[in-house]
Amino acid sequence: MTNENEALGRKPKVHFIGIGGTAMVAGARLALEAGWEVRGSDVPLYPPTSDMVAALGVPVASGFDAANLDWAPDLVLVGNALSRGNPEVEAMLERRLRYASLPEWLKEHVLRQRHSVAVCGTHGKTTTTALTAHVLQGCGMDPGYLIGGQPLGFEHSARLGPEGVPFVIEGDEYDTAFFDKRAKFFHYLPEIAVVTSVEFDHGDIYADLPEIELAFQRMLRQIPKDGCLIACADNRAAHLKAHAFSRVATYGFSEDADWRGEILDAQDGYQRMRIWHDHQAWGSIEAPLAGKHNLLNTLAAVAVAATLGANPETIAAAVRTFPGVRRRMEVFLETKGAVFVDDFAHHPTAIRETVAAARMRWPGQRIRVLFEPRSNTTVTNRFFGDLAEAFSAADEVWLGPIFRADRIPETERLDREALANHLQRGGGEAHVEDDVEHILEAVCDTLCPGDVILILSNGAFGGIHRRFVELLSPDSKP
């Protein structure tokens, strides 16, 4: 297709339906860098995605309409949130336009020309992808990348990079598109595949944990013999070793991990860790990240960089300067002696580890968790027991409105009242509230110096972050 357009003397034209998805906006950035003319459409968006889309500087229609395709794109890329019945999807099919999923486009136009490093797993993908890209950049490898979030150290969430260099990509196990129900990572041609964890999630497309494990096993079949699987030794990801056709390296705190971390005392705001490789001392790092889970993410990035030939000193220097990712333990407001933290955690394991990381970073302070049940699994009772255990380490929990509750049968919907009662019986403080403004008022009225307000949601949570800033920012009017 690109050659056809070159013959006509014009740029190839691509339209992104659902351009506001975190991967889609990153893909649009790559298409622009690759010389494509880009346009898109989506529903009204919220920060940070709306800011990322605006930064593209391309025409983006608000709302879906068949007329958005009248500019006759050469290719339509369909986001995985889109389905039959969408007016642009229907127009695309009726007009016999060429279409593809974003992962399919990435495979053919980005990854075949580069050395793919796919970061996969139930948790930690975005932070590990951003950290790995940052470390490789610090080691002089000039990598390309696609990060499923907004990295604080890069201008954008995606960069094409030169041909022939490593390309670090977040490898999601969620399905690809309405016409391709395979996991996205099947398209990513991994030469190195990192698997951070394997747990049950995405109950709308996977029946159980063995089905998810099978998807990961099938992904491993694409790694060439001289490639490498880098799997966490501390969880079910280690089970994938038996299914690999390539070299395998494990990482973690387990004694038998090939890349083993030993946690040292924190110092000057950095979490220190001594690292052993194949039972030999490799070196030490200082990570500006809180929580054991983030040290695991750091070990994964270290293993990738070392596998690609970087030396310990350069890797350690790069790790120390990692600035983080938006919505991953991001402090967005400090006022009245309290700290407000935004985090994307929505799976019970991620919630548990994020609360633990907050305890590590702010020891002895009151941890108040505000949670929006939003993912396709946490809006149901499937994780009831796991959520109860995850929230038990918090001092106070607010269970906010269930996203699109009317679409979930009442018998399957998360029973927030029962969950709150369970937490109260365990000695915690828990509340259920459907009105975000009421949550705001209650938290503000009871705010004390030393409070850590931990807001957990993989969505907008009714704009609660912005409202806290409006109400409590030192610059706001009384």
Image (tube, rainbow, N blue to C red):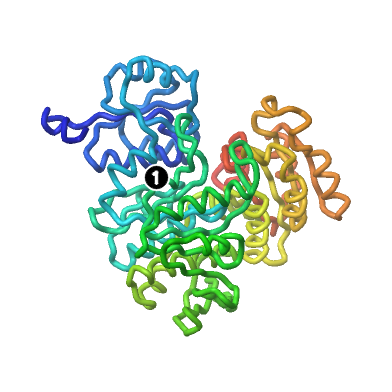
Residue 127 visible in this rendered orientation of the protein: yes
Q: On the rendered structure, is 453 left or right of 53?
A: right
Q: Quadrant of residue 90?
A: top left
Q: On the rendered structure, is 183 left or right of 24?
A: right
- Percent position of residue 424, x then y: 85, 49
Relative height, residue 271 to residue 12 (above, below): below
Label 1 amino acid?
His
Relative height, residue 232 to residue 387 (above, below): below
Most distant residue in the bottom direction: 280
Q: Say how many tags the image has.
A: 1
Most distant residue in the right direction: 425
Q: Residue at x 38, y 71 (%)?
A: 306
Residue 330 visible in this rendered orientation of the protein: no
Q: Quadrant of the C terminus?
A: top right
- Percent position of residue 291, x then y: 60, 64
SS label for mark 1: helix
Nearest the viewer among 319 and 86 is 86
- Percent position of residue 25, x then y: 39, 38
Nearest the viewer among 76 and 316 is 76
- Percent position of residue 328, x then y: 54, 53
Q: Residue at x 41, y 61 (%)?
A: 132
Relative height, residue 72 to residue 266 (above, below): above
Q: On the rendered structure, is 178 left or right of 94?
A: right
Q: Which residue is mark 1?
A: 187
Q: Residue at x 29, y 31 (%)?
A: 38
Q: On the rendered structure, is 422 left or right of 181?
A: right
Q: Quadrant of residue 458?
A: top right
Q: Quadrant of residue 331?
A: bottom right
Q: Quadrant of the N terminus?
A: top left
Relative height, residue 25 to residue 392 (above, below): above
